[in-house]
Image: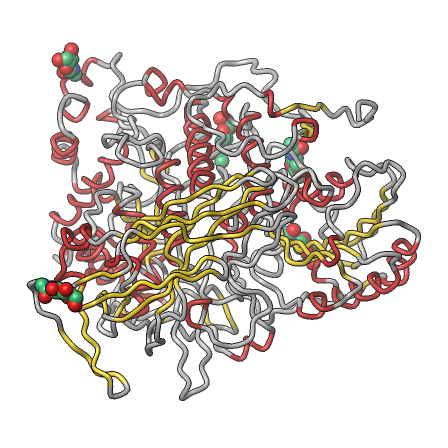
Amino acid sequence: MTGDKCMCVFINFCAFPNSNQHIIFHSMALSPPFVSFFFLTFTLTLHSQPLPPPPPPFACDWSNPSSKSYPFCNPNLSILERTTDLVSRLTLDEKLAQLVNSAPPIPRLGIPAYEWWSEALHGVAKSRGINFSGAISSATSFPQVILTAASFDSHLWYSIGLAIGIEGRAIYNGGQAMGMTFWAPNINIFRDPRWGRGQETAGEDPLVTSTYAVSFVRGLQGDSFHGGKLMGHLQASACCKHFTAYDLDNWKGVSRFVFDARVSLQDLADTYQPPFKSCVKQGRASGIMCAYNRVNGVPSCADFNLLTKTAREKWDFNGYIASDCNAVAIIHDQQGYAKSPEDAVADVLRAGMDLECGNYLSSHAKSAVLQKKVPISEIDRALHNLFSIRIRLGLFNGNPTKLSFGMIGPNHVCSKKHQYLALEAARSGIVLLKNSDALLPLPKTNPAISLAVIGPNANDFTTLAGNYAGPPCRNMTVLQGLHHYVKNTVFHPGCDGGPKCPTAQIEEAVEVARKVDYVVLVMGLNQSEEMEELDRVQLDLPGKQLELINSVAEASKRPVILVLLCGGPVDITLPKYNHKIGGILWAGYPGELGGIALAQIIFGDHNPGGRLPVTWYPKDYIKVPMTDMRMRADSSSGYPGRTYRFYKGPKVYNFGYGLSYSKYSYEFVSVTHDKLHFNQSSTHSTMDENSETIRYKLVSDLGDETCQSKMVSVTVGVKNHGSMVGRHPVLLFMKPGKHRSGSPMKQLVGFESVLLDAGERTQIEFELSPCEHLSRANEAGLMVVEEGSHLLLVGDVEYPIHIIM
Ligand SMILES: *[C@@H]1O[C@H](CO)[C@@H](O)[C@H](O)[C@H]1NC(C)=O
Ligand SMILES: *[C@@H]1O[C@H](CO)[C@@H](O)[C@H](O)[C@H]1NC(C)=O
Ligand SMILES: *[C@@H]1O[C@H](CO)[C@@H](O)[C@H](O)[C@H]1NC(C)=O
Ligand SMILES: *[C@@H]1O[C@H](CO)[C@@H](O)[C@H](O)[C@H]1NC(C)=O
Ligand SMILES: *[C@@H]1O[C@H](CO)[C@@H](O)[C@H](O)[C@H]1NC(C)=O
């Protein structure tokens, strides 16, 4: 390894000092020390800084005597007192100018310009608010979210959020940002496999997505893992988007701008809304973005019930609400919901939106006010919400680099620690889908083996990033990662023209494959197949990919290994059952160190443990219109339903599927009570189903105290029977004892990722609230607890619980 002429620097991360108190590598000891290497080619740009960076923009410069006289500059006053003072000083024109994403400066009050639009989905990205053209030219590019979700590891999600928040703050402090309001995470449910932005999400399950939202937001905003540390301050500001039921971009001519999502109250209650509720209530997110689409006729950004009654009043939201970009204009121009531009402006401000991404308000807010369609009180409310965020970010306290978060320097961007975390995220998420006859891992100890790496995604580092990626700290391909293990590696792209693969050089690829000991095919999709404004219309591998795979597999000496880079699922039924394909790995879009992560798994330096966060459907699923928002199956019309909770048809792979080099076993060690009595005081209601009378109670009638008192502790034992250390996510499901129409067939109620040595056993404790985990939404969208039995389920092991009314 030392003779490597590409000047790679090897770093043993097990010996890496844990100097930054912020980040805990809870999962460091994953590999035996001698293999826990990966190479860092230090082409980082931080080596020389000729000039000190310009100071970041801030208000209340103490060198200006008038700052001391402004109550809005006084950190001893409450935020409300400060914003009240500030707003009272503004003219109408100054007020209106602040309602758009590029907020202009107010020089007479010493207030600089602010850019609200920054992106940080899986790493700080280039955007209006973030500039990579100074000393800092890149940021850590973590795996695309769908892969990170596959780790089922909330500590990892938190650490990533924290790292991104630190890098965002460091970039601001380094004078290369105009704002610190990041429009992430995307917490919509990945409802349909064709969605081009499904890759940005944490998958199809509401609990996983909710937990992802809370963990990521707490990390990014600088809170503790369990929350409650911040006291209102913000390291950076996160934004839960896109509120709500947004999961279609552009499918067969139906665009997100005009789509009217018809959503039942039941689906809204137990699928679409839970991530937003968690993001706001537990995560304490300081931003929400309302979506382009309409929900049951009402544009999300003009929905008072959604923005004000639900988010602000029911969930106690106290941040700002931004529109998706140009979402106000379309309410009039494309949806025709508002009769005039002024009506559109009035609709959104009345609904509770505070900030427009766009400039429709710059053109039409003044006339809306003059026509008395918008009272000043609504504008003032928006301004309070907006300035309170800038104050909480510490931008109205004098030079922020003198304050706590201001000490975060540029050395945090692309730090070894963050890059290690990116590697850890990739290898924790990658899912082993097939491993016939234990083909994997390949023998790394044999220096004489030869390897062919074939496929359009093998030597393209841009594919690894996924959308909303920033410039990565380093560019490395899967080919480079594999080459690190096998010097005798040959490459062939297989397809002409990338993953679209309209034509393939099959004979040439076959010739390459025939000559070597092992073949790894790196196939899948890229952003030309699935992205924002581009949903897929089919689920096959594009073009000639399958033909190429089959021909290469047929010709190879041994069964081949297929690596899939894609966000949404593809139908790989044929490779799944092809005996010439011995191993299949799904790697999402694994980020800047995804090539290393894959190589470590293929050569056994890491034991794969990721599990699919979405159902993989067969390709004829496309007969379901993407526009049909119903989660629940409808047998009368042949509608099959969506996601593992409701879809009854055949699957290529199930939600939660994923193999490992270890076998794990489970047992229920204890369940604190398996009979839950709800027959005290308050009366029950009944409903009839199939001539059976079922008693139930509304969760809202039970009240928090009863719900708390009925908590069930479930202790699950898990053992690693393999010979390798492994990280393994344990998934606890609940299954209604008797299937009732409208109930999920199965529902995830808890999950936790554990690190287990070879032969090690541990116990995990899950706390279940019957009101939260054993309840379901009724057709009116209300959560109910019903009498009857439920099965707890881990793997194939079941445990019954009874609810008695
Ligand atoms: C805030 O309070 C502290 C402590 O009472 C005081 O020293 C400081 O001058 C006050 N700051 C302002 C701007 O009034
Ligand atoms: C980025 O910053 C550089 C120097 O600070 C400046 O010249 C450039 O205009 C900025 N670009 C953008 C897009 O803000
Ligand atoms: C990665 O590649 C891009 C595009 O070629 C380039 O702009 C960037 O500088 C490269 N980054 C590094 C760290 O080499
Ligand atoms: C994706 O692949 C296509 C060919 O299939 C190529 O033209 C395009 O540049 C690639 N796009 C990205 C964003 O990598
Ligand atoms: C609730 O039901 C249980 C079992 O049927 C019974 O033992 C208990 O007395 C009941 N409690 C009330 C308050 O009715």
Where in the figure is residue 93, as x and y percent of width and height? 21, 42
Locate the C terminus by quadrant. bottom left
Q: Is residue 311 left or right of residue 538?
A: left
Residue 679 visible somewhere in the drawing: no
Toward which corner of the image does residue 64 lie, by quadrant? top left
Locate the N terminus by quadrant. top right
Residue 388 visible somewhere in the drawing: yes
Where in the figure is residue 389, as x and y percent of width and height? 26, 36
Does 448 sit above or below residue 265?
Answer: above
Q: Residue at x 40, y 88 (%)?
A: 636
The one nearer the camera, 328 or 499, is 499
Tell which residue pokes out farthest to the left in this image: 681
Q: Is residue 38 left or right of residue 56?
A: right
Does 101 sit above or below residue 655?
Answer: above
Does 635 sit above or below residue 510?
Answer: below
Toward which corner of the image does residue 549 lie, by quadrant? bottom right
Does 118 sit above or below residue 671?
Answer: above
Label tally: 0
The one nearer the camera, 47 or 60, is 47
Quadrant of ligand 5 in image: bottom left
Where in the figure is residue 34, as x and y percent of width and height? 70, 27
